[in-house]
Image: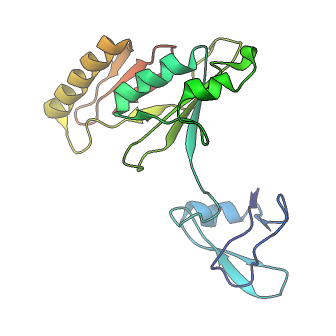
């Protein structure tokens, strides 16, 4: 595992001008420090010591974060998630609309991609790409749609059920309620079967 360079603001680590250039290697014993939120100290090329940032620290090399969905119908799934999250359609850079982007592509590629984003800029961009194969197993990761934050018991369950009813009307599928005295959640599927939770 490697911490990618550059790491601005950390003494002794210079900005790399070569993509894929050397990073700061992490050794197996470093993982305990990262898990515990302690800095990882590492001897670096100029013989000075530096503390690499831990979980929760800014990651200055990341410019944008997005979540990508493989799907059969990118625009349809993207518009579903716009309704779920209050997102807006975000056209590709350099194009006013997705239609304009599609017209620039070969016919076989048209409709292969779509995206939406949080109008406030707080949430990640969601990107949808067409793939030939269908979904056959449970997702290894999923989104949690946080509608019950700060609520417990019956009040939380009422908020989850109200949101579940709204999303089922949009085409989502209710899978099951995971009941708990205080922290219930509802497992759902989007319009192409991707799991998510109302939490």
Residue at the (77%, 88%) spot, across then down? 48
- Say whether residue 194 is visible: no
Residue 142 located left or right of residue 7: left
User: Which quadrant of the rendered structure holds the C terminus?
Assistant: top left
- Say whether residue 89 is visible: yes
> Can you name the residue that lies furthest to the left here?
155
User: Which quadrant of the rendered structure holds the N terminus?
Assistant: bottom right
Residue 199 located left or right of residue 15: left
Indicate the quadrant where residue 159 lies. top left
Residue at the (26%, 42%) spot, across then down? 149
Residue at the (20%, 22%) spot, across then down? 162
Indicate the quadrant where residue 150 lies. top left
Q: Is residue 44 above or below residue 192?
A: below
Q: Is residue 150 above or below residue 104?
A: below
Indicate the quadrant where residue 106 lies. top right
Q: Position of residue 119 (x, y in %)?
A: 38, 43
Q: Position of residue 188 (x, y in %)?
A: 40, 19
Please give the count of numbered marks on the rendered protein. 0
Residue at the (26%, 19%) spot, across then down? 166
> Relative to the observer, which residue lies in front, 78 or 21?
78
Q: Is residue 55 above or below residue 130?
A: below
Q: Is residue 81 above or below residue 64?
A: above
Q: Position of residue 82 (x, y in %)?
A: 40, 28
> Relative to the observer, which residue lies in front, 179 or 138?
138
> Relative to the observer, which residue lies in front, 125 or 51?
125
Q: Position of residue 127 (x, y in %)?
A: 57, 33
Coloring scheme used: rainbow
Residue 47 located left or right of residue 136: right
């Amino acid at each position: 595992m490697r911490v990618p360079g550059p790491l601005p603001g950390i003494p002794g680590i210079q900005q790399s001008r070569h993509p894929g250039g050397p990073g700061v290697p992490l050794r197996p014993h470093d993982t305990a420090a990262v898990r515990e939120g302690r800095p990882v100290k590492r001897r670096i090329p100029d013989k000075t010591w530096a503390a690499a940032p831990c979980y929760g620290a800014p990651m200055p090399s990341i410019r944008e974060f997005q979540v990508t969905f493989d799907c059969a119908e990118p625009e349809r799934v993207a518009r579903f998630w716009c309704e779920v999250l209050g997102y807006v359609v975000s056209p590709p850079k350099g194009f006013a609309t997705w239609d304009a982007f599609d017209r620039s592509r070969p016919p076989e590629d048209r409709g292969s991609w779509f995206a939406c984003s949080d109008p406030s800029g707080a949430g990640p961009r969601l990107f949808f790409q067409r793939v030939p194969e269908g979904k056959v197993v449970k997702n290894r990761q999923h989104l949690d749609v946080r509608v019950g934050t700060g609520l417990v018991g019956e009040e939380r369950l009422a908020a989850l059920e109200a949101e579940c009813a709204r999303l089922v009307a949009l085409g989502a599928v209710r899978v099951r309620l995971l009941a708990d005295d205080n922290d219930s959640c509802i497992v759902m599927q989007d319009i192409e079967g991707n799991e998510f939770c109302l939490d």
